């Protein structure tokens, strides 16, 4: 007797925050002999990522409308109908046992099509608050998987964490007083212009008052020359990069990190126990980065700076206190490690496998 093949379809496009957790889940499901099909967009970054790991992808014609003016809003109903029909055709032909949505604009037409076809829908929300798509589509879903803790009195909600690539790593950190401090600066995958302008100036001020060697790796994106030019005038060891290929090595190398407050970045900090100064991206949808960071702040697990308050003088003061006081660094590290949700990918996949089996 032939055993019927089990199949999952995943919806994610546009940003790494949606795509990379979906990839972690897909890889684990493939290990369990589950066939995967992905729905994305023709021009999205997901195409390059998925081609590297041999996951099949189909495309629909849909994109987000926030901040793009009135015309896309007027056209939205027609585009949504068209995209839903495209998704309906793909899903009907593939005939999956379950649909997994990672949030974002592409999930609208895909989840609507899945619901019409009576496919069980699981959605994953990476942040501490629901994005617009997930907030609406949770009505259609059978399970809602939470990447960050939200108080929900329903079995429909499962707090299982954010799937990330380094879940099996056990962090080991020393917090002795140091004569040398390694500082990692991450402005997101594309860098952050404000980091490139302000952080080198803060290091310049800090270096004049600190009896300690500072080594810096600064992931600066496209505007890297702004940071590089300033660091050249400071007596510090530095390396400015457009992009960091091995974040694992960078996390393990650093004593302190300055970064943004995306859910996946935060989840990685929870794995490595990095003492963090987080400057949430102020234009993130629904200010979700700040809300993520306020949660960490409430647990004394990170130092959070609103970007409007980010000055060279203020940042130098914060860094000085961290560098000179190893107890603060140790407390931040221990507290953020305590927030880690263990085996997120495995537990999410087990939930999916229980459903389809």
Image: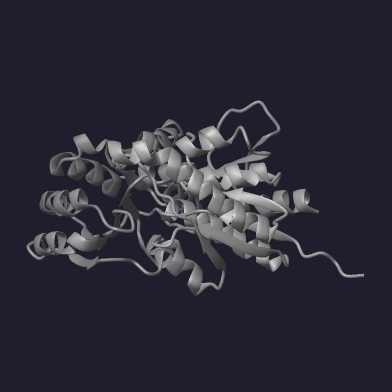
| Quadrant in which the N terminus appears | bottom right
Colouring chosen for the image of the structure:
one colour
**312 and 99: which is toward the camera:** 99
Side (left or right) of 5 relative to 130: right
Reply above or below: 32 against 68: below
Q: Can residue 162 be seen in the rendering of this structure? A: no
Residue 41 placement: quadrant? bottom left
The residue located at (39%, 62%) in the rendering is 43
The residue located at (32%, 50%) in the rendering is 259
Reply above or below: 250 against 147: below
| Quadrant in which the C terminus appears | bottom right
The residue located at (70%, 51%) in the rendering is 352
**81 and 281: which is toward the camera:** 81
Residue 250 placement: quadrant? bottom left
**119 and 321: which is toward the camera:** 119
Spot occupied by residue 101 in the image (x, y as percentages of width and height): 57, 48
Spot occupied by residue 336 in the image (x, y as percentages of width and height): 47, 44
**221 and 234: which is toward the camera:** 221
Spot occupied by residue 239 in the image (x, y as percentages of width and height): 23, 68
Q: Which residue ends up furthest to the left in the rendered image?
A: 233
Q: How many numbered markers are drawn? A: 0
Q: Can residue 96 be seen in the rendering of this structure? A: yes
Spot occupied by residue 122 in the image (x, y as percentages of width and height): 64, 45
Q: Which residue ends up furthest to the right in the rendered image?
A: 1
């Amino acid at each position: 007797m032939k055993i019927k093949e089990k199949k999952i379809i995943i919806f994610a496009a546009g940003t790494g925050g949606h795509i990379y957790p979906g990839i972690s889940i897909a890889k684990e499901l493939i290990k369990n002999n589950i066939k995967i099909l992905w729905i994305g967009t023709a021009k999205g970054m997901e195409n390059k990522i998925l081609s590297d790991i041999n996951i099949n992808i189909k495309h629909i014609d849909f994109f987000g409308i926030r901040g793009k003016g009135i015309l896309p809003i007027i056209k939205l109903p027609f585009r949504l109908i068209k995209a839903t029909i495209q998704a309906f055709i793909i899903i009907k032909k593939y005939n999956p046992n379950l649909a997994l949505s990672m949030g974002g604009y592409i999930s609208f037409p895909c989840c609507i099509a899945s619901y019409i076809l009576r496919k069980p829908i699981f959605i994953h929300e990476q942040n501490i608050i629901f994005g617009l798509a997930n907030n609406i589509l949770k009505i259609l879903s059978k399970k809602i998987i939470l990447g960050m803790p939200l108080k929900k009195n329903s079995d429909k909600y499962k707090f299982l964490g954010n799937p990330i690539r380094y879940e099996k790593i056990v962090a080991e950190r020393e917090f002795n007083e140091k004569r040398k401090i390694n500082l990692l600066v991450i402005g997101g995958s594309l860098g952050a212009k404000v980091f490139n302008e302000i952080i080198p100036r803060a290091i310049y001020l800090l270096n004049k008052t600190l009896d300690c060697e500072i080594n810096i790796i600064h992931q600066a994106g496209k505007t890297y020359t702004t940071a590089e030019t300033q660091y050249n005038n400071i007596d510090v060891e530095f390396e400015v990069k457009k992009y960091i290929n091995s974040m694992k090595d960078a996390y393990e190398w650093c004593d302190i990190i300055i970064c943004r407050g995306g859910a996946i970045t935060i989840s990685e900090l929870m794995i490595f126990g990095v003492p963090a100064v987080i400057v949430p991206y102020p234009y993130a949808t629904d200010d979700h980065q700040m809300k993520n960071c306020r949660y960490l702040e409430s647990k004394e697990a990170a130092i959070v700076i609103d970007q409007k308050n980010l000055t060279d003088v203020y940042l130098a003061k914060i860094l000085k206190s961290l560098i000179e006081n190893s107890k603060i660094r140790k407390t931040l590290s221990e507290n953020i490690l305590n927030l880690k949700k263990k085996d997120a990918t495995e537990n999410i996949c087990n939930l999916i496998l229980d459903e389809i089996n």
